[in-house]
Image (cartoon, coloured by chain):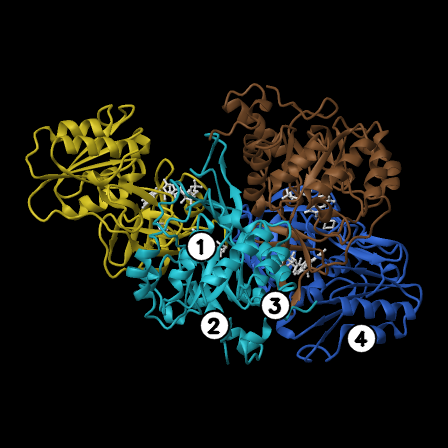
Chain colours: A brown, B cyan, C yellow, D blue
Amino acid sequence: MDTTIRITDELVLKNPVMSASGTFAYGEEFSEVIDLSLLGGIVTKGLSLEPSKGNPVPRIVETPCGMINSIGLENIGIEAFLKSKLPLLGQWKTPVVVNFYGTNEDDYEILASMLDSKKDVAALEMNVSCPNIKKGGIHFGKDPDYLYSLVSKVRQATNKTLLVKLSPLASDIAEVAISVQEAGADGITCVNTIPAMAIDENTWMPVLANITGGLSGPAIKPVALYMVWEVSKHVHIPIIAAGGAASYRDVIQFMLAGASAVEIGSYALRDPFCFTTIIEGLDKYMQENALDRLEDIVGKLKT
Amino acid sequence: MDTTIRITDELVLKNPVMSASGTFAYGEEFSEVIDLSLLGGIVTKGLSLEPSKGNPVPRIVETPCGMINSIGLENIGIEAFLKSKLPLLGQWKTPVVVNFYGTNEDDYEILASMLDSKKDVAALEMNVSCPNIKKGGIHFGKDPDYLYSLVSKVRQATNKTLLVKLSPLASDIAEVAISVQEAGADGITCVNTIPAMAIDENTWMPVLANITGGLSGPAIKPVALYMVWEVSKHVHIPIIAAGGAASYRDVIQFMLAGASAVEIGSYALRDPFCFTTIIEGLDKYMQENALDRLEDIVGKLKT
Amino acid sequence: MKDLECQIVSNQMVCEDTYLLQACCDFESWKPGQFVMVRINDSFEPFLRRPLGILAYHESKLELLYKVVGDGTRCLSLKKPGEIIAVLGPLGNGFRIPAGDEQVTYVAGGAGLPPILALAEHIKKGTLIIGARTRSNMPLLTRIQSITGVETLIVTDDGSIGPKALAADILEEVIQDSHLPGIVYACGPPAMLKKTALISQAKGLACQVSLEERMACGFGVCTGCIVATKSGNQRVCREGPVFEAAQIRWS
Amino acid sequence: MKDLECQIVSNQMVCEDTYLLQACCDFESWKPGQFVMVRINDSFEPFLRRPLGILAYHESKLELLYKVVGDGTRCLSLKKPGEIIAVLGPLGNGFRIPAGDEQVTYVAGGAGLPPILALAEHIKKGTLIIGARTRSNMPLLTRIQSITGVETLIVTDDGSIGPKALAADILEEVIQDSHLPGIVYACGPPAMLKKTALISQAKGLACQVSLEERMACGFGVCTGCIVATKSGNQRVCREGPVFEAAQIRWS
Ligand SMILES: Cc1cc2nc3c(=O)[nH]c(=O)nc-3n(C[C@H](O)[C@H](O)[C@H](O)COP(=O)(O)OP(=O)(O)OC[C@H]3O[C@@H](n4cnc5c(N)ncnc54)[C@H](O)[C@@H]3O)c2cc1C
Ligand SMILES: Cc1cc2nc3c(=O)[nH]c(=O)nc-3n(C[C@H](O)[C@H](O)[C@H](O)COP(=O)(O)OP(=O)(O)OC[C@H]3O[C@@H](n4cnc5c(N)ncnc54)[C@H](O)[C@@H]3O)c2cc1C
Ligand SMILES: Cc1cc2nc3c(=O)[nH]c(=O)nc-3n(C[C@H](O)[C@H](O)[C@H](O)COP(=O)(O)O)c2cc1C
Ligand SMILES: Cc1cc2nc3c(=O)[nH]c(=O)nc-3n(C[C@H](O)[C@H](O)[C@H](O)COP(=O)(O)O)c2cc1C
Ligand code: FES
Ligand code: FES
């Protein structure tokens, strides 16, 4: 039974189960509880040129079958990451995907070229879809033409596998995905959180200090599944799914819809050991369905 | 204690609790179980010029804290509605809002003018955001410029209160809302279902015969709340909220975010008697918070 | 239609994966073939109610017989006596009860048993054909075999009880020598219903089938549950779940 | 940190809205001030785990003391003996145990009781000040008053038990005549913690506070739970929940 997934020649996963950005930090805490070598891939917290403090608390709120976060991309900054986190992360036999974002175009370019030379980095995931920061993030990802030029620049700056992570909040996500593909991205991560908010009817105040945040978890899985399906009909580069995945069933569903791999985010906050359960579940599913190569099911939805 | 909500001079609700389109049919079934006079407003199933059969079954699937439907706007057509349903609906002391859609621009215009003369119709809700039909629906609602011209035409065709119902799937919902306001709409309904899908990992098939559908229910409430808040910051016409409301708490939250009234959709499928519970809950809330006029809290989120 | 908070009296496995639930309930009236929508939890999970046929209702006690097939029914099966479920019903049209002395035949397969049993226990005559996969799949055997006035024929896929046959095949034999007028009632998997309908029609017998479709509301407002009939789309939950077989456009 | 399926041994109301839960559990080690993340349901509702301080752990039995404030704790309060909850822990740093003969004072308010009780039961000396709203709000009275070596002072907002005062006010009196070195441990509402910190500082006493913040993971990966300290953002769940009061940037 072969669970290998080939995203690009440089990004080959031993199975389709990855961590998602922002719910796995830089891997250290998880390395104490699970064997990181088992994972298909590890995606880091989103990194910026300078360290970022993120938004004030409260920045987490629970919702029906999901959660909203307004972390605001708090991170230790690229320098500290390269110096103190990457060496540790690189030691596992699992590809490291570095998620990054800028607050202007130059940031994106500089970050990409800084990461380009790092042998422990298997791929870059470019975040143009975070709903939680004032400048950058989601605003870069809205206009297909603008995004085309931004991704093109980043493409010039690195030879590494380049994934671009999209927002589900697009009038036409296929159009956005096509721009990204034309600009030379190697793959698309689909999707980031959905802009959302929570209000306390007793205090008349927003629950989150940042007022708004991004919705994630099982609640949004049906939307993420749609987005993957929609994008997969329009692009030929690989898709990595994110959005509410919580079980091997979800992973199979995303793959049938067209994803090559699936990132597990919020659910791993609830159940840190779910990675192991999901990977085991996939093995069992393959056995029961007499599948030799897991990759064969990608996009095989019968319609 | 005054729970009256004034949307326009013609559309005055005795309280902010309304039915949503598509989960209340034409009121007959509900009239057998609850007193329709208690409701703030009744919104009919979406009507088209000709009767429509909708999509094949299955067209319902449950999801975490929500559901996806792909009904495809099955309806009896405007003629049959005017003849056999409206007279019954009009007898309750509750304003009737007729939801309608076209598969081309002319349809929208003709429907609006047909409804314009009907005294039992308090307002029109123009659906430009249904994800379930091939032509019409969501495609009309995506491009702000196109939508401006479509709403302008419909505006010419009727003097009735005109609400336009938006899709949450917009790169910039505020821009869409502003177009709608400029085109002369009297109010905005915010929001329709979010495009979504479900897949059966055992059969490798979509669960819905139509492949995709629209997500609704508590799962999407945080998104709908965000949309209402975002729109309310940019327009001055009244907003009617829809999306996952299930309790008087949700109604208050939507009102604080800027909605004048709230439609209850999916939750009423689960609990048909919830309208009464919610209305009672609002009364209790007003008492506990010493509120004289419920309308006073609209948009009063403390930020 | 009422929404009743019903206290569970008992909820026990009666055969592999199948549970018999008894709950205190307060219907004004009901008819065999009607169903209820059960809200399993107060929390939003599962979000929708589940449609279940009424197996019996007497002395303020409602009986449901259900098979655990997914999360909703699994969750229901974990409920203990004393716990509350919300029951919306009775819903749907129910079977047409024969007015005269027609010969009556019932065909039930799989989870289609409850409404058919309710009907047989009401009419108290005729022949009841039940198809199951295997013996361990057949619930309420003694109860079924002792329905007053009703002759029971059980068939299984593996012959572990009764002949190794399909219910619809047996039907053909049973109504072989039947006198007109007669009526056949059926509930079960679509393939069985279709076959039953064709056989009955060929023999000139009336046939009513009780259909299943995914439901959101169960009382007619969402049009989630339609079936194509010769007079257009009909709602299984409202115009049905019982239909004249001749009206259905079988797919 | 382990994720343990723990069977509930008992789960009883010990005073208005407050429950004592005992469950079989299997920690290798733990420290007073640590906490666990409790997964209440198998279903996705509630989605996140709930952080609860460890009240006690001995002979493979974990004790939690929690107040019902919302849906999650309400749902937990309905669990019966025999049912399973998933417990992730022990988490966080725990209190610094005094090495020498410092004078020890504890201040606990509201839901801040569990970690402080755990600590007092461990250190077995010092003065324990507890603030509650009213008598019916004070759980485990007998147990608290019999902690070996610890003197207990209870104050309430309404004087229904002990003086009518705030815990932090009493603190001022208690440490009036205290000899240095000394340490004050506190857990409770933010206002109380801040006041305790200021008083301790003014008297030149060390002070550790255990903080609460909304948490998603509880083990440091989401940065949902940060607190601003003099050395930047720190995660309450990982660098905390116990912090040197002097390090906190009180808002
Ligand atoms: C009118 C009617 C009467 C019924 N009576 C009985 C009965 O007496 N005993 C019994 O065991 N079963 C009966 N069923 C089928 C029963 O409703 C389903 O088995 C049950 O809803 C499955 O729920 P689940 O959560 O366990 O499965 P899941 O597969 O997890 O359910 C997911 C969703 O699919 C729907 N669904 C799944 N299977 C069916 C189905 N066969 N029919 C309709 N919806 C389905 C569920 O309602 C739910 O919304 C009846 C169905 C209908 C329509
Ligand atoms: C480290 C730590 C230890 C704690 N120990 C205890 C204890 O021993 N006993 C006790 O009664 N309570 C304790 N709390 C508070 C307890 O976690 C909350 O009361 C509980 O999570 C509320 O959940 P709910 O679903 O009932 O309330 P809801 O208000 O419905 O919760 C909604 C969300 O808000 C979060 N939340 C609400 N209040 C708090 C709060 N005060 N702190 C953190 N998150 C909150 C919940 O975790 C949940 O995600 C502790 C909190 C922390 C951070
Ligand atoms: C707490 C939290 C922090 C996140 N931080 C980031 C981030 O730094 N960069 C990014 O691209 N996405 C971030 N995300 C989005 C997730 O990577 C993922 O796309 C999204 O949550 C949907 O997947 P899920 O439902 O499995 O969580 C974050 C999500 C959460 C919940
Ligand atoms: C079964 C179903 C049918 C619907 N039909 C329509 C419709 O005909 N026209 C329309 O504008 N919206 C329709 N909607 C959308 C709802 O009116 C509402 O906007 C949406 O479901 C979000 O609200 P909710 O979460 O309260 O259901 C339908 C929704 C459902 C669930
Ligand atoms: S289930 Fe809603 S109409 Fe039948
Ligand atoms: S709760 Fe996730 S870092 Fe503390």
Q: Name the residue under label 3.
A: B236
Chain letter of disc 2 in the image: B
The label on residue B15 is: 2
Relative to residue B268, is residue C135 depicted above or below?
above
Q: Mark 4 points at which residue?
A: D170
The kind of residue tagged 4 is Ile
Q: Which of B64 and B87 is in front in this view?
A: B87
Mark 2 is surrounded, within 10 Å at the Cα level, by few (under 14), some (14 to 19) or many (20 or more) other residues, namely many
Q: Do labels 1 and 3 share a chain?
A: yes
The kind of residue tagged 3 is His
Tell me the quarter of the picture where residue A181 sits.
top right
- Give the mark nearest the N terminus, 1 or 2: 2
Q: Do labels 3 and 2 share a chain?
A: yes
- x 65%, y 22%: residue: A4
Number of labels in the image equals: 4
**Residue B216: x percent and y percent?**
50, 51
Chain letter of disc 4 in the image: D
**C-alpha separation, residue under disc 1 versus residue under disc 4:** 73 Å
Mark 4 is surrounded, within 10 Å at the Cα level, by few (under 14), some (14 to 19) or many (20 or more) other residues, namely some
Quarter of the image that includes the C terminus of chain C: top left
Q: Is residue A214 visible?
A: yes
**C-alpha separation, residue under disc 1 versus residue under disc 2:** 29 Å
Chain letter of disc 3 in the image: B
The kind of residue tagged 1 is Tyr
- On whether ligand 2 comes within 8 Å of the CB at mark 4, the answer is no
- Check whether the beta carbons of the residues at disc 1 and disc 2 lie within 8 A of each other: no
